[in-house]
Image (cartoon, rainbow, N blue to C red):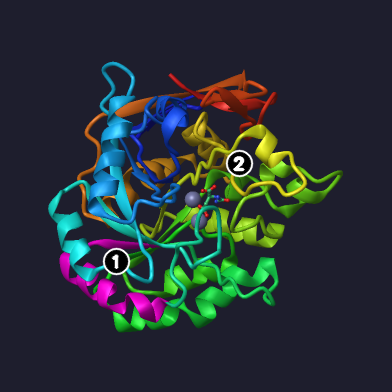
Amino acid sequence: MTATTTTLTITRPDDWHLHLRDGEQLKDTVRDASRYLGRALVMPNLLPPATTTDLALAYYDRIVAVRPEGSRFEPLMSLYLTDKTDPQEIRTAKATGKIVACKLYPAGATTNSDSGVTDVKNIYPVLEVMQETGTLLLVHGEVTDPSIDIFDREKVFLDTVLPDVVRDFPGLKIVLEHITTEHAVNFVEQAGDNVAATITAHHLLFNRNHMLVGGIRPHFYCLPILKRNTHQQALVRAATSGSKKFFMGTDSAPHFQHRKEAACGCAGAYTSHAAVELYAEAFEEAGALDKLEAFTSHNGPDFYGLPRNADTITLVKESWTVDATLPLGGDQLVPIRAGETIDWMVK
Ligand SMILES: NC(=O)N[C@@H](CC(=O)O)C(=O)O
Ligand SMILES: [Zn+2]
Ligand SMILES: [Zn+2]
């Protein structure tokens, strides 16, 4: 890293949790993602979900086909686990070199998770092969029991579901995705080197007051839901601590404006237009800009066992205004910070 107060040059970042969607939306999401990311771990929660090697590879081809001219942005693919996933499918997937992880969505936990896993014991034979082949397990860590308060669903998952998996598969690399609580920070810190976590920019910058005070603001509604500010502070501490266990995963999740500004609005926040720029704000606010590069560009590839990107990007401290809406597949979305300013810009 080289830095002055107004510029910051860092190794090219990767996004380890990104929703690119499909079809008409793909050219818009890929355009934003390929501005400066080296790689992105692409989430498989499509309709229908990317449950097999063939589906994931066909999705890879559709992404690569809409990359802007000259872009070297590289999608890393994941398989969507179901109760019926065939353990042999993991060997086929791993052998492609393009599929590096499988995603555990507890059935019903989040957007397009209806085909997810109903009991983690159902995928134990699959986890066995993942452990053996070095395929990462990415986890949406929330229970779905309707009697559990939505603000407690991550904590209860960490108390009741994940400890068994960690104990029974000591050689399995696990990423707890988009963590939102101090409990999750503690869980990851206390676990072995095979357990890490992604943290989104919006969970570092916002808490539930931003979503609920002065009116209900649907563009801050995502899952796991924003928590109280003490949890936000714990996430900032973790991200800026210098620990290798925490890294960038934006969970940028586009939804049409009319699907979010609705009586039953979709979960997901869009940050792909300004991912590293928003993280830079959060790290600067914490007085930890010197820790940004490890978080955005080193810890992720190191944990995945992949090389770090060889080139750099430069951020400048320069304020710019985010458009009120951005195009999405012939319709539009409302990004985080719509119509407001962001302090950092990537040159
Ligand atoms: N985070 C979200 O609120 N939504 C994501 C799904 C997910 O990552 O859980 C989406 O696909 O829209
Ligand atoms: Zn999720
Ligand atoms: Zn996500």
In this rendered view, identify the residue nearer to me: 103 or 289.
103
Type of residue at label 1? Lys
Q: Residue at x 31, y 46 (%)?
A: 298
Q: From where the camera sits, is residue 29 visible?
A: no
In this rendered view, identify the residue nearer to me: 32 or 306.
32
The image quadrant of residue 63 is top left
Q: From where the camera sits, is residue 78 visible?
A: yes
Relative placement, left or right, of 122 versus 253 is left
Position of the N terminus by quadrant:
top left
Q: Provide residue 326's location: percent of width, then percent of height.
A: 58, 24
Determine crowd level at label 1: few under 14, some 14-19, many 20+ residues with C-alpha closer than 10 A. many
Q: Provide residue 92's location: percent of width, then percent of height.
A: 16, 58
Q: Circle 2 is placed at which residue position?
A: 285
Q: Residue at x 31, y 52 (%)?
A: 78
Helix, strand or loop at label 2? It is helix
The stretch of residues the image draws in magenta is 120-138
- Nearer-N-terminus badge (1/2): 1
